[in-house]
C-alpha cells in the first residue's frame, strides 16, 4: 500500500508538471500577453515596459523555469487588475469556495445516497418512480438555471432568503443547494444501481440466511461496499463542482475562486488565471490520492502491494 501511494504521488507530480506547462503555454503561445494587458492603442514603449515588468522579453524556457521556481515558493506574481500579490488574493478567495463546495458536496452526498438507498429498497414502487423522476430532472437542469429559479421563488416571491452576497448561513443556502442538486441526482442513480448489485450478491444472501435484520444487512454489510463507485464519482466530481461553482458564484455574487477566475479572464489578468488553475490541479491530485486510499478502507479485497 505504501509503495502504491508513493507511485501515485510521483505520478501526480508529473501530472501537475504537465498541467503547469500547458497553462503556461496557453497564455504565451497565443497573442502577445502585453497586448492583452496594455490599454487600447498603446505604443511600443508601453508594450516593452509591460514585457519587462512581467518578464515577457525572456525566452519561453526561461519564463517557464521562473514561473515554476516562483510557484514552488507560492509566488504567482502581481495581479494586473487588483495590484496585489496573486497568492494573497487566491488565499483570500479560497475559504468562500471551500465553504460553498463543501456544503454542496455534503448536501449532494447526503440526499443522493439517502435517495439511492430508498430507490433500491422500494424498487418498482411509487417512491422508486418518484426518485427516478427527481434524479432525471436534476440531471437535466443546469446549475445556473436552478440558481435563478431559487432566487425567483425564495427571494423574489417568498422573500425569505437574500438574493446574493456572503457572510451568513442564509447567504449559503441557495448557492449550496443550487450547486449540489445536480450532483445529488447522479449519486442517487449510482447508489441505487450499485446497492442493487450488492444486495443480489452471495454474501448478502448468507447474511439473510443467518437471520440478520434487513436494516443490518443493508446499513452494515451492503451499503459500505456499494459506496465505492459513489466515492470515486464524488472525488472526480470535485473539479467539475469547482468549475460549476464559477456560474453559481457569478449568479449569487459569491466571492470565491470561481468568481476570481472569471474576473481574471474578463480583465486579462493571466497571472490570476494561471494561479487558480494550477491550484485546482494540485488539489485534484491530492483528492485522487485520498480517493485511492479510501478504496482500501471500503473494500478489503483491494490490495496494492
Image (cartoon, grey):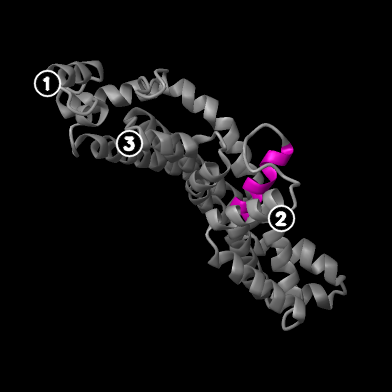
Q: Residue furthest bottom?
A: 124
SS assignment at label 2: helix
Vertical comparison of 229 with 72: above or below: below
**Which residue corresponds to mark 2?**
110
Mark 3, Cα crowd under 10 Å, few <14 / some 14-19 / many 20+, is: many
Q: Where is residue 147 in the image (x, y as percent from the top left)?
A: 59, 52
SS assignment at label 3: helix
**Which residue corresponds to mark 1?**
44
- The residue that appears at 53% across and 35% down in the rendered structure is 256
Numbered label attached to residue 20: 3
Q: Can residue 300 be seen in this view?
A: no
Q: Is residue 97 visible?
A: yes
Mark 2 or 1: the one toward you: 1
Q: Is residue 14 left or right of residue 158?
A: left
Q: Where is residue 64 in the image (x, y as percent from the top left)?
A: 24, 28
Q: In this view, does 100 lie to the left or right of 283?
A: right
Magenta-highlighted residues: 169-180
- The residue that appears at 48% across and 24% down in the rendered structure is 89
Mark 1 or 3: the one toward you: 1
Work out how far the residue at label 1 is from the one at label 3, CA to CA, in angstroms: 30 Å
SS assignment at label 1: helix
Amino acid at each position: 500500500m505504501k509503495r502504491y501511494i508513493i507511485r501515485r504521488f510521483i505520478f501526480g507530480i508529473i501530472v501537475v508538471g504537465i498541467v503547469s506547462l500547458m497553462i503556461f503555454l496557453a497564455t504565451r503561445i497565443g497573442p502577445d500577453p502585453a497586448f492583452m494587458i496594455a490599454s487600447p492603442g498603446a505604443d511600443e514603449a508601453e508594450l516593452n515596459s509591460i514585457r519587462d515588468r512581467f518578464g515577457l522579453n525572456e525566452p519561453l524556457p526561461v519564463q517557464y523555469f521562473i514561473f515554476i521556481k516562483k510557484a514552488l515558493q507560492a509566488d504567482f506574481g502581481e495581479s494586473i487588475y487588483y495590484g496585489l500579490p496573486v497568492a494573497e488574493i487566491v488565499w483570500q478567495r479560497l475559504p468562500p469556495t471551500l465553504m460553498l463546495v463543501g456544503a454542496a458536496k455534503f448536501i449532494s452526498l447526503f440526499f443522493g445516497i439517502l435517495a439511492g438507498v430508498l430507490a433500491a429498497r422500494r424498487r418498482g414502487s411509487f417512491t422508486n418512480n418518484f426518485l427516478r423522476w427527481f434524479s432525471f430532472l436534476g440531471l437535466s437542469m443546469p446549475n445556473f438555471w436552478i440558481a435563478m429559479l431559487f432566487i425567483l421563488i425564495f427571494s423574489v416571491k417568498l422573500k425569505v432568503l437574500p438574493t446574493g452576497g456572503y457572510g451568513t448561513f442564509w447567504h449559503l443556502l441557495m448557492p449550496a443547494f443550487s450547486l449540489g442538486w445536480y450532483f445529488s441526482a447522479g449519486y442517487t442513480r449510482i447508489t441505487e444501481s450499485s446497492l442493487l448489485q450488492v444486495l443480489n450478491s452471495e454474501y448478502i444472501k448468507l447474511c439473510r440466511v443467518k437471520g440478520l435484520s434487513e436494516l443490518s444487512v443493508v446499513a452494515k454489510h451492503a451499503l459500505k461496499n456499494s459506496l465505492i463507485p459513489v466515492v470515486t464519482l464524488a472525488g472526480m466530481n470535485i473539479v467539475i463542482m469547482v468549475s460549476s461553482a464559477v456560474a453559481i458564484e457569478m449568479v449569487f455574487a459569491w466571492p470565491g475562486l470561481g468568481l476570481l477566475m472569471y474576473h481574471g479572464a474578463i480583465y486579462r489578468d493571466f497571472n490570476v488565471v494561471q494561479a487558480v488553475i494550477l491550484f485546482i490541479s494540485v488539489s485534484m491530485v491530492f483528492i485522487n490520492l485520498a480517493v485511492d486510499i479510501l478504496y482500501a478502507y471500503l473494500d478489503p479485497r483491494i490490495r496494492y502491494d
